[in-house]
Image (cartoon, helix red, strand yellow):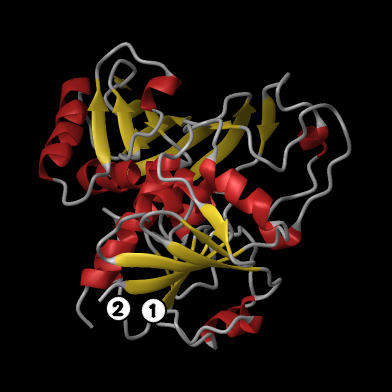
Amino acid sequence: MKKRILLNGVGRIGKIILRLLDKNDTFEIVSINEINPYIKNIVYSINHDSTYGNIENKFKIIDNNYIQNSSSKIKILNHSCLKDINLSNIDIIIDASGKKEDKNILQNLDVDAVFLTHPNSNADINLILGVNEKQLDKKIHKIISTSSCNATALLPALNLLKEEKGIFCGDIVTIHPLLNHQRVLDGSFVGSPTRDVECNFEFGRSSTQNIIPNKTTTIEACSYILPNINSDLISSSSLRVPTDTVGAINVTLFTEESSTKEEIINIFEEYEKNQKFPIMLNNYEPLVSSDFKKENKTTIIDHRYTDVKNNKMIKLLLWYDNEWGYASKVVEILKYYRNKKD
């Protein structure tokens, strides 16, 4: 029997999850809760996408609060809080709203599990495949964070090098595409505590005309999963760039043990050969960011820029589709959860 899902929010991540789960044999999205009150606009935004193209199996409105295509019939809800929703026919909630909900509210929801598509220190577990999935215990982990796109890309690589070479210290710079809370042209900017967005004056500047420096919570998100990978060990910053999707991370690590460039490349190649999940991809081709669009692997090591200096300084460049790739990992975590024995 299919697990019935309530999808909370059909923004950038939510509607990709909807696309990935359409015609799925294991999961069925039966309800969508969206703060947008206009069902015509909801179905329009689901059917059409400037980044990934239009879907072939288009949805249409039927009745007043349902949308349907050839494989799915979905009820559209409009509630500001999950506790106000009748969950009698729901097994799992995927909260892709980006909003931080009170933990007590989430714990009291009458469903098997709530998946949060953002890092959350109050979750029962923050989970990244290839790092800590074995710790998942369905008996005690009801609120499950699928972490962030950046941490999902970075932590498998950091964890691998930590196990193989030890990490003395390091620095990362994320090069991240623009997001919906940014401005097209210069204007005011006010942060949102419920969405983990600080009041950053630079975000009031035009996202299409500037490279915008910013803080990043990437290492903080990593520390929720591996506490010894934290801001005392690795410094971080971010550059927001005017592209639609696919991010990169410039990684500098000082290791406890010596290495050669060939040895580091071999470590990643062996991992890719033996990985249980579609996580890592080693690239040697002369590619650019758009070439990785819609790639479901999320730790893409570009070995054109892999290097080792003085035996203990490692340089890496990682690519990842911050929307499609990350949403693919959310779906992979759902599958892992379903197959995990109680």
Label 2: how many residues lie within 10 Å, few (<14), some (14-19) or many (20+)? some
Label 1: how many residues lie within 10 Å, few (<14), some (14-19) or many (20+)? some
Closer to the camera in the image, 258 or 144: 144
Image quarter in which the N terminus is found: bottom left
Q: For numbered disc 2, what is the local secondary structure?
A: loop
Mark number for residue 96? none
Q: Residue at x 32, y 32 (%)?
A: 300
Whole-percent x, y for residue 340 in the image: 22, 73
Q: Amino acid at mark 1?
A: His
Whole-percent x, y for residue 19 in the image: 41, 49
Residue 333 position (above or below residue 316): below
**Residue extending furthest toward the top:** 286
Q: Residue at x 48, y 41 (%)?
A: 323
Quadrant housing residue 290: top left
Residue labelled with disc 1: 141
Residue 1 position (above or below residue 189): below
**Residue extending furthest toward the right:** 188
Whole-percent x, y for residue 87 in the image: 52, 83
Q: Amino acid at mark 2?
A: Asp
Question: On the picture, is 173 further left or further right than 1?
Answer: right
Closer to the camera in the image, 224 or 57: 57
Q: CA distance from mark 1 to mark 2?
A: 6 Å
Residue labelled with disc 2: 137
**Whether residue 233 is visible:** no
Closer to the camera in the image, 41 or 100: 41
Image quarter in which the C terminus is found: bottom left
For the residues labelled 1 and 2, say whether their Cβ atoms are less than 8 Å apart. Answer: yes
Residue 156 position (above or below residue 74): above
**Whether residue 65 is visible:** yes
Q: For numbered disc 1, what is the local secondary structure?
A: loop
Whole-percent x, y for residue 167 in the image: 34, 43
Question: On the picture, is 39 further left or further right than 258?
Answer: right
